[in-house]
Amino acid sequence: MEGRNFLRYIFFLMSIILLLFFTFLNLPSPLSHTAELLDCTTYSPWCSSRKPFFLRNPSKDKKRYADFPKHPLDPLTIQEIQKVKKTINSLEDFKVKGSYVLHSVVLEEPEKEVVLNWRKGQRLPSRKASVIARAHGDVHVLTVDIEAGHVTRHEMDHLSGYPILTIEDMITATAAPLGNSDFNRTIIQRGVDLADLACLPISTGWYGKVEEKRRVIKVQCYTMKDTINFYMRPIEGLTVLLDLDTKQVIEIIDEGKNIPIPKAADTDYRFSTQKNTQKLNLLKPISIEQPNGPSFTIEDNHIVKWANWEFHLKPDPRAGVIISRVMVQDPDTGKMRNVMYKGFTSELFVPYMDPSDAWYFKTYMDAGEYGFGLQAMPLDPLNDCPRNAYYMDGVFVAADGTPYVRSNMICVFERYAGDIGWRHAESPITGLPIREVRPKVTLVVRMAASVANYDYIVDWEFQTDGLIRAKVGLSGILMVKGSPYVNMNQVNQNEYLYGTLLSENIIGVIHDHYITFHLDMDIDGSNNSFVKVNLQKATTSAGESPRKSYLKAVRNVAKTEKDAQIKLKLYDPSEFHVINPNKKSRVGNPAGYKIVPGGTAASLLDLDDPPQKRGAFTNNQIWVTPYNESEQWAAGLFVYQSQGDDTLAVWSNRDRPIENKDIVLWYTLGFHHIPCQEDFPIMPTVSSSFEIKPVNFFESNPILRIPPNSPNDLPICKAAASA
């Protein structure tokens, strides 16, 4: 056994040294791709499925991405990415192989008016790529005309911050500390075998000290001994500060020498490892059958058509999922009407509530620092998504410009859970034998991102009555803190743990999650207004009525951005409408949609706290800004080590006019998370949502004429045994 461990240790060190050698010399790594395309289904472009695309068996590997664009908003194809790479390689600053890193290569979408005027069958607008690169320590923002093969924009001046971490950044950062003898000595002194080590790259935030004028990252480590769930076995208090570009260790902080590593018992969450006596067979198999197949279609790889809805769907390395050109059919005219030009997850902010040296900096921006879409994992059929789901792949770009595929990144499916679309039954006292009920079937677009320990499930759900629901589920594994305590009776009454003791030597630290959505609403056209409809108490005059009070709705149209900065208040109830003042219903009401908040949370951090300055887009739950194609990311274009000088809060405080303009609404879902024992060793999903609901958009109930189900419509499935 000792010999086997020694060989594992030698092999591990040799792999790390080899990887670092090629990284330091800027040579292509033997662990990386050897072809022009990788099929990537795991965390890294250098994943276990390394067979080049042209060697895979097409009959066994269904391709779910396009070879050619067919819509102005379609993502870049493999061929287009390769052309972009060739163009970038021709630039003076980028000619030397390995002299640059590509942090982002995505479609630079055509101007909004061009997209709105485009019709299927017409020639596509000029295809351009937006590129963010670093070369010789400088950040470059470029636009590449793909067909012409030249750069039309090249900028280097920008506000604070750096681009999204590349996967290569993260891999080399976690390996680099092993090249430091002091680090290795510290690990061994903690009683951890280097072969069992697992480390995570943790963004540093901005605190104005060592973050100045260089990219840095912090690395913290765990042991995988006797469990796959290494997150539950932290080497507490050990933090390595690393220069991301040189991979040199700047500082090693070790303040947890007296904190034991938690035990591995009962931490493995995989079904295959559970003892037969522990397995719970609570349910019989359940499945929603569709004998005639699904009701939705996917045209040209990205156009989703279902019931009365049509929209464009694409994966994105930063946002994850982008829904565009959302239209719904009017039941009276049969025409498709615009609802939303573009909707996506703009940023996620996750601050932990522990000010100690090993924790204060854990204030993640999961989209702008790590890439929400880059962390999207392949969905598991029958478990992540039901039968008859359609899957879509994402085509992304590695740091050297090589395209790779993230398989099964998005799924689309119909959901029926026995919910009711509408109903009414007459009471017997009326003598009317009426019982009218309609089932509710919805369409769901789903993505799941595993940002290290946490898993986020994002759903866009469409209803036939015109409603859109955005839902976020949280699951995965807590980020925990090692503790000397095994029971709460050991804790001094005056000592604060910054969380909950979940198991022996494990504290689940209190934290928040904020997910900010960018919603470019286009209600029957681009010129819209934001209306706050406030419910106010009114009192009756003497002798007017037996009632003393009632509620009245007071409508206020926001003139400027500050008028539309909304903090939700339980005792100041309001509705929040986006209307088209130029489009009226038959009886004269403006066509609109309203944002219906769900259960949410608001940030309680001090506004001057450094992480809250960067996360100032969470200061309000609702913001409205005039449309600006450069204002898409709530935390700014460059988020890593940013100082909060390019956020939604900064833009909104310019107080620009927004009445009867092309406007964007921003909504933030929030979660306060006080961990509990039920979150150990892995969390049951908790979720929250908000709705985008029609208000005076249709002339009447848009699903009035939908027929009810009848026994002949549905097959009878014979159960294995009677209930």
Image (tube, rainbow, N blue to C red):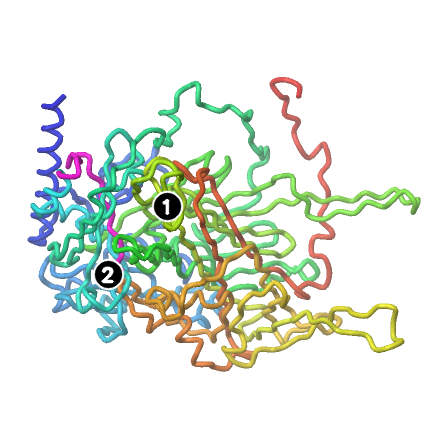
Q: Residue at 88% of width from left, 68% of height from top?
A: 546
Q: Amino acid at mark 2?
A: Val
Percent across and percent down for residue 441 are 62, 44
Percent across and percent down for residue 83 are 23, 59
User: Which residue bears the numbered disc 2?
Assistant: 84
CA separation in Å, label 1 and label 2? 61 Å
Q: Is residue 691 above or below residue 499?
A: below
In the visual, does 688 lie left or right of 29?
right
In the visual, does 471 lie left or right of 53?
right
In the visual, does 383 lie left or right of 153?
right
Q: Residue at 8% of width from left, 43% of height from top?
A: 17
Q: Is residue 263 above or below residue 458?
A: above
Is residue 76 something one can see in this rendering?
no
Q: Residues within 10 Å of mark 2 (few under 14, many from 20)?
A: many
Q: Residue furthest front?
A: 493
Is residue 535 something one can see in this rendering?
yes
Q: Find the magenta span and give its range.
A: 189-204
Q: Is residue 13 above or below residue 315?
A: above
Q: Amino acid at mark 1?
A: Asn
Q: Residue 186 or 324: which is nearer the viewer?
A: 186
Q: Is residue 588 above or below residue 44?
A: below
In the visual, does 397 lie left or right of 535?
left
Say whether residue 190 is magenta.
yes
User: Which residue bears the numbered disc 1?
Assistant: 492
| Occupied quadrant, residue 284 | top right
Instruction: Tell me the mark number nearer the camera, choosing from 1 and 2.
Output: 1
In the rendered structure, which disc, 1 or 2, sits on the residue that comes first in sequence? 2
Q: Residue at 13% of width from left, 68% of height from top?
A: 93
Percent across and percent down for residue 379 are 40, 40
Q: The residue tagged with tag 2: helix, strand or loop?
A: helix
